[in-house]
Image: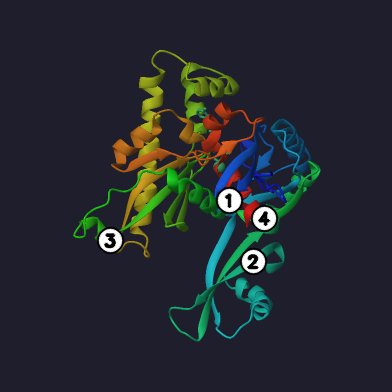
Amino acid sequence: MALFNRKEPILGIDLSPSAVKLVELSRSGPRYRVEAFAIEPLGEGMMEDRNPADPEMVGEVIKRAWRNSGTRVRRAAIAVPTSGVITRTVPMPANFSESDIETNIPFEASQYIPYPVEEVYLDFEVKGVSQASSDMQDVMLVVTRKENVDAREAALKEAGLIPIVVDVEAYALENTFRLLMDTLPRPSEGGPLSLSKARESLTALVDVGATITNLYILQGERVIFTREQGFGCDQLTVRIAEIYGLPREQAEQAKRSGQVADDFAATVLEPFKQMLAEQIGHGLQFFFSSDQFASGRYTVDSIVLIGGGAMIVGLDRVVADVLGITTVVANPFKNMGSAAKVNSSALLRDAPLLAVAGGLAMRSFG
Ligand SMILES: Nc1ncnc2c1ncn2[C@@H]1O[C@H](COP(=O)(O)OP(=O)(O)OP(=O)(O)O)[C@@H](O)[C@H]1O
Ligand SMILES: [Mg+2]
């Protein structure tokens, strides 16, 4: 009996600045299974402005990831970085059909974007009747520069893969978050008179990458706020290189193994974690002081860490201590089985790095 639906799977492929990350999932009823995954490092300069600088070279790395993963699937979903996308809610007459919207959207978009319309790809989603007027409907406009998509598609094709879905990192992470929800600590339930009921509780998903950190605030399963901050784990590598006089490559190795010097934890690692926690706190302050969310109606009562930063042992503890908010490291695959060919201990270790790729792989199922 074929338990796992293997009809038309789609690979999730995250082309991030530090590595190509690949995930294949299958599903049987409510159960998911990891069929294959791989992380293949990208050399310095292979990605430029978060896009493949040379599709042929990045294509080679994708091909290696594909081979190492053991997958046979060639259809793939990719994501444009959240920072490379502009989204706007545009009001349109309520009686406009999809095709009316499609005809009018380029003109509307031209008023919202700082580039010529010829240089961008446009997409839209009808959100429903406008709150301001029942004569209008809200249309969410999604715009990205063509190069963000074209360079990724070209690299994929070089690797012999077929790009069939182009997503946005933030939306891929909404999928991941849906998987994660069951694994998160429940906010403590108060009685009917509990004060906590007066505020709406939100979750912060924090993607601590190599050079940037993205804060996503989620209301239920929806991202309602994002903010990019210019810090990440590479700063720790640079510190190690400086302080211990190591070349970059060796500093990177030392960072991952934790075997640097006796004073490493006290003089470098702990202050670095402290700094990360404070920066995450600054991101939250931006959220709470933004026009839309400054009302005091909201509270962030859990933080979920993903990305390379989540691999730093004990960062969750420090963030929880500094910010006073329950903090966990995400493992989107926690409740999943895995195929025999999958190295399950490597999957467990690398899970936080695979959050975007995992969310993209969910596109196989709608
Ligand atoms: N085991 C580990 N321990 C500590 N740091 C690690 C570990 N594994 C990876 N990293 C660090 O994580 C970073 C890469 O994280 P990630 O893959 O999330 O970044 P990215 O998405 O490629 O980059 P960015 O999001 O900044 O554009 C690198 O700085 C790397 O050194
Ligand atoms: Mg990243």
Q: Are marks 2 and 4 in contact (CB under 8 Å)?
A: no
Labelled disc at residue 67: none
User: Looking at the image, is mark 4 or mark 3 earlier in the sequence?
Assistant: 4
Residue appearing at x 40%, y 32% in the figure: 315
The reply to whether the residue tagged 4 has its Cβ within 8 angstroms of ligand 2 is no
Three-letter code for the amino acid on which mark 1 is drawn = Gly
Front residue (pair 118, 151): 151
Q: Kindly state the secondary structure of the residue where label 3 is placed.
A: loop
**CA–CA distance in space, label 1 to label 3:** 40 Å
Q: Mark 2 — residue?
A: 123
Looking at the image, is mark 2 or mark 4 earlier in the sequence? 2
The circle on residue 166 is: 4
Q: Position of residue 61 (x, y in %)?
A: 73, 35
- Which one is in front, 5 or 90? 5
Please state the quadrant of the image where ligand 2 appears.
top right
Give the distance between the C-alpha atoms of the residues marked 2 and 4, in whole angstroms: 11 Å
Identity of the residue furthest to the top in this view = 262
Visual colour scheme: rainbow
Between discs 2 and 1, the one toward the N terminus: 1
Q: What amino acid type should be assigned to the residue bearing mark 4?
A: Val
Q: Name the residue under label 1.
A: 29
Task: Quadrant for the C terminus, please.
Answer: bottom right
Q: Is residue 16 left or right of residue 216?
A: right
